[in-house]
Amino acid sequence: MGEINFLMFPNKEQASKYAANKIYNVFGELKSDETMILGTATGQSPVLLYQYLKELVDESDWWKRESQYITFRQLDNYVSPGSSKDNLPPYSYQRELEESIWQIPNAGTMIPKEYEDPSKECARYAEEVNLSTQNADYIVQILGIGDNDGHIAFNMPGDAFDSTVHIVKLNEETRQSNANKFFNGDIAKVPKEAITMGVGDICKSDFIILLAFGKKKADILWKAFFQPPTTDVPASALQNFEGDLFVLLDPESASTIIQKEGEESIIEIEMVDDDEEWWLYTDIDDDEENFYDDDEEYDDEDFFDDDDYFDGYESDDE
Ligand code: GLP
């Protein structure tokens, strides 16, 4: 089994900067012709991460040159009868991604399309997900978590841990929570179905970053990671994930875990406070194709070797 790292930052801004750095550097560690899938999630949790990743990329000729090797693969999308390619609904995940992370240079984007016939689109996406998983050299998955039921992507409680791309009927809780966040509280406007990658697909990633901020995530995080895994809480499948999992928290979302499991279950991190400097550590030398390999200069200050990183930036209370 892989390692689960619970990292608590002073706020979601710092957590998101850390996540952006992590992704940028994972990509930088690949050999020059290796491909990476960056699995994207929608919702509020990754919004700042996408913004910061774009800031990094805007400074980076290196990424622009290597972007032909990175594909963005979306976890899920609503099914939206009556919409069309040229008339996407206002809540369209495609629209949301086009306005954020898809603006970052990339080799391609993958998403289940809300306007196609659901069962045909589900079969097409299942094939696309399988093929891309087989062909990618490295898969990084970004995840959020459902506030009350612990859903990941749109896998509802009860979905099997080995599930693949499928159509889901969204439960009342998820629809109400999404209505509050994105539909002015009007549950009638929230679609009733979605196409989602399965828990099994998600667990084929090499590396997962789960972002969860605010009090409303606190209890479900504890249930998902500190209680026995159960399909009633889809995120609890991640306890058996074989790759590395980083759960990035703020003090509010970490509160139940700290209360029930003690402070030692969480690593506290405080990054440099200076906005001007947070991204400097990721400066990838444009002359280096593969910046970590055989590179004395970077070996000395391998900032993203986690131990060094924590040494430098752990909070004083540690
Ligand atoms: C939706 C998405 C999930 C997301 C979840 C939490 O249901 N399908 O991928 O993780 O909401 O969203 P938020 O990050 O806004 O709390």
Image (cartoon, grey):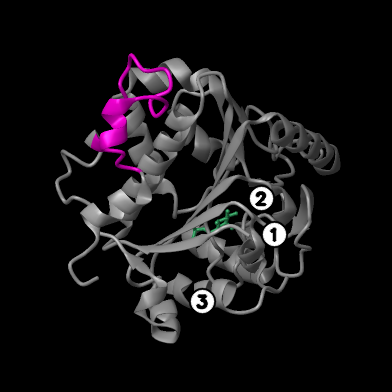
Element class at badge 1: loop
Work out how far the residue at label 3 is from the one at label 2, CA to CA, in angstroms: 20 Å
Q: Find disc 1 in the rendering and name its residue.
A: 155
At x 85% / y 37%, what residue is drawn?
120
Identified by mark 2, the residue type is Ile
In the image, the residue with mark 1 has its CB under 8 Å from the nearest atom of ligand 1? no
Q: Which residues are magenta?
A: 281-304
What is the three-letter code of the residue carrying label 3? Trp
Residue 259 position, x and y percent, is 39, 84
Secondary element at image label 3: helix
Instruction: Please tell me whether mark 2 sits on a helix, a strand or a loop.
Output: helix
Q: Residue furthest bottom?
A: 260
Nearest the viewer among 156 and 86 is: 156
Q: Magenta span: helix, strand or loop, mainly?
A: loop
Q: Is residue 142 left or right of residue 301?
A: right
Residue under label 2, please give it: 202
| Whether the residue under disc 2 has CB within 8 Å of ligand 1 | no
Q: Is residue 285 magenta?
A: yes
Ligand 1 falls in which quarter? bottom right
Going 16% across and 51% down the picture, which residue do you hit? 273
Query: If you read the primary sequence from the N terminus, does the residue marked by circle 3 or circle 2 appear first?
Result: 2
Q: Tags 2 and 1 in contact by the CB under 8 Å rule? A: yes
Q: Is residue 171 magenta?
A: no
The answer to whether residue 196 shows anywhere in this view is: no
Give the image location of residue 129, x and y in percent.
73, 37
The residue singled out by tag 3 in the image is 222
Amino acid residing under circle 1: Asn
